[in-house]
Image: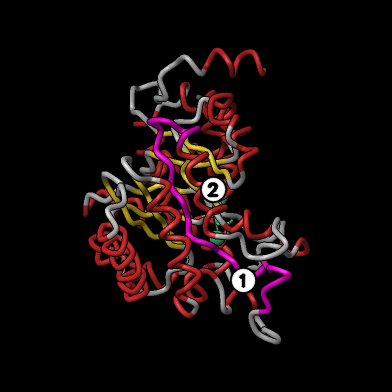
Amino acid sequence: RQELYRELRKKPSSTKDGMHVDLLMNAGLAVDLPQLAESGAAGIGLFRTELQFMVAATFPRAEAQERLYRDVLDAARDKPVTFRTIDIGGDKVLPYFKSVAHEENPALGWRAIRLTLDRPALLRTQVRALLKAAGGRELRIMLPMVTEIGEIMQAREVIDREVRHLSRFAHDLPTLLKLGAMIEVPSLLWQLDELMRTVDFVSVGSNDLFQFVMATDRGNTQLSERFDPLSVPFLRVLKQIADAGHRVGTPVTLCGELAGRPISAMALIGLGYRSISMSPAAIGPVKAMLTELPLETLAAHLEAALEHPNAAKNMRADLLAFAEQH
Ligand code: PEP
Ligand code: MG
């Protein structure tokens, strides 16, 4: 199989009927970087910057952050990298940072962009490190756990201020700065068009989005058999997002665990996703699926099944049958 995946790296990243799909990888530490070449990923769709914070004993200094970001961009060369601003809080606790005494529902608590907007020095330091590391090249910044568009505006102000600050001191700035948001909180589903017009790109965090849409703790193994992301309600949510992206013309990626399993990756592509980001080890198996996928047939099949769900009550079984058949 490894041999097959290595061979596949030379093949175009397209479905059997010729639709191109970007297969990106998720990363978070310098040790992940060699995987970029080994996996054949088209870029880094999600760089989880909080990992550097989680493995450290104190807040990483601005210089250490800048060094890591520069190493990542150097390793990626001309492949795109999307840096997510620190997503701490919730299940990602920093032992050296006591957020609040006790949270009844940490997943719904003071985390990610909520925390960084309340502690702007954290965001400012990180943004400055990113801007400096990306001098002379493209920079893509993505905000986690956005609940309302105002949060993006606030973060953009912080970024703009840092850009002005660096240009005043004649620093080499990024040639292009793109700002994106993760779709992880269901409130965004009712602001999709405005959201898509506000940002340069979005990325679905299906791990958290599923947890919140289905009211199902992503870490609770007692529930792991109970609800299926490949079910009618969640597939409809995912389709709504892909459709809004096409309607407004904003690029949409999905970077949750769903992207890394061939059967769910197949469903995503059938729903209209043209860019998915996964663990590097998943790229080979997903590409093997991709190159054999008759996309037009699948898209029509899915559309009908989601419109008339009684025709396919068990979507997972239905998708597996499609995969078997094709
Ligand atoms: C997600 O929620 O799907 C996601 C990609 O972010 P994380 O897993 O880091 O919360
Ligand atoms: Mg998440």
Q: Dominant secondary structure of the magenta stretch?
A: loop
Q: Is residue 220 shown above or below 107? A: above
Please state which amino acid type lies under the numbered disc 1: Gly
- In the rendered structure, does residue 85 fall within the stretch colored magenta? yes
What residue is at 54 percent from the left and 30 percent from the top? 36
Q: Residue tagged by mark 2? A: 315
Viewer-proximal residue among 6 and 161: 161
Looking at the image, in which quadrant does ligand 1 appear?
A: bottom right
Query: How far across and how far down the image is residue 237, in percent?
Result: 42, 59
- In the rendered structure, does residue 48 fall within the stretch colored magenta? no
Disc 2 secondary structure class = helix
Q: Is residue 274 shown above or below 239? A: above
Furthest residue toward right: 222
Query: How far across and how far down the image is residue 232, in percent?
Result: 49, 56
Q: Residue tagged by mark 1? A: 89
Query: How far across and how far down the image is residue 245, in percent?
Result: 29, 52
Quarter of image, res 160: bottom left
Query: How far across and how far down the image is residue 189, in percent?
Result: 37, 67
Q: CA distance from mark 2 to mark 1?
A: 34 Å
What residue is at 45 percent from the left and 55 percent from the top? 129
Query: Residue 247 shows which numbered tag?
Result: none
Provide the residue span drawn in magenta: 74-98
